[in-house]
Amino acid sequence: MIQTIINIGLFLLLIWFIANRLLPPKGVRIISAAQLKQELRKKDVHYIDVRTPMEFQTNHIPGFKNIPLHELPKRVHELSKDKEVIVICQSGMRSAKASKLLKKLGFQRVTNVKGGMNAWS
C-alpha cells in the first residue's frame, strides 16, 4: 500500500518534470522562424540572442543583441519591461529557458522563436 503511494507520487513528479521542460512557459508567445521575418519590421522591440558569443559571431541575425543565457540574470537591466522581448538561440531550448526567466522577472511580452537559428534560413 505505502509502496503504491510512493510509486504514484514518483510517477506524478516525473510527469510534472517532463511537462515543465517541454511545455512553453505560461504567457510566452511562440513564433516560427518564418514569422520572425515579419516581426523584424517591428520597432521598439528587444531582439535577444542567448547563444554563446562564439555562436553569435559565427552566424547571427542583424538587429539581435547577444546576451548569453548564463549572463541574462545579471544583464537583464539592459532590457526594458515596457518593450516586447523576442528571444532566439540555436534550437529553441535555451531561448525557452530565457523566456521563462524573463517572465519570472516581470517581463509581460516575451516571444520565443521555435527552432531557433536551425530553423532560420
Image (cartoon, rainbow, N blue to C red):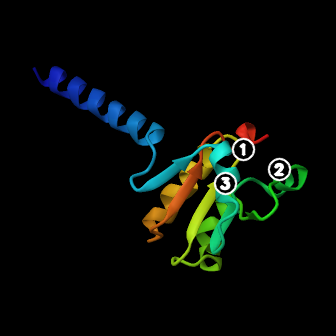
Crowding near pointer 3: few (<14 within 10 Å), some, many (20+)? Answer: few
| Residue 38, numbered label | 3
CA distance separating discs 2 and 3: 24 Å
The amino acid type of the residue labelled 1 equals Gln
Q: Are the residues at dot 2 and dot 3 in contact (C-beta closer than 8 Å)?
A: no
**Nearest-to-viewer mark from 2 and 3:** 3
CA distance separating discs 1 and 3: 19 Å
The amino acid type of the residue labelled 2 equals Glu
Kindly identify which residue carries mark 1: 90
**Nearest-to-viewer mark from 1 and 3:** 3
Tell me if residue 97 comes above or below residue 74 in the rendering.
above
Q: Secondary structure at mark 3?
A: helix
Whichever of callouts 1 and 3 sits on the residue coming sooner in the sequence is: 3
Q: Secondary structure at mark 2?
A: helix
Residue 48 location in percent, x, y?
A: 68, 62
Tell me if residue 106 comes above or below residue 87 in the rendering.
below
Toward the left, the furthest residue is 1
| Residue 55, numbered label | 2
CA distance separating discs 1 and 2: 8 Å
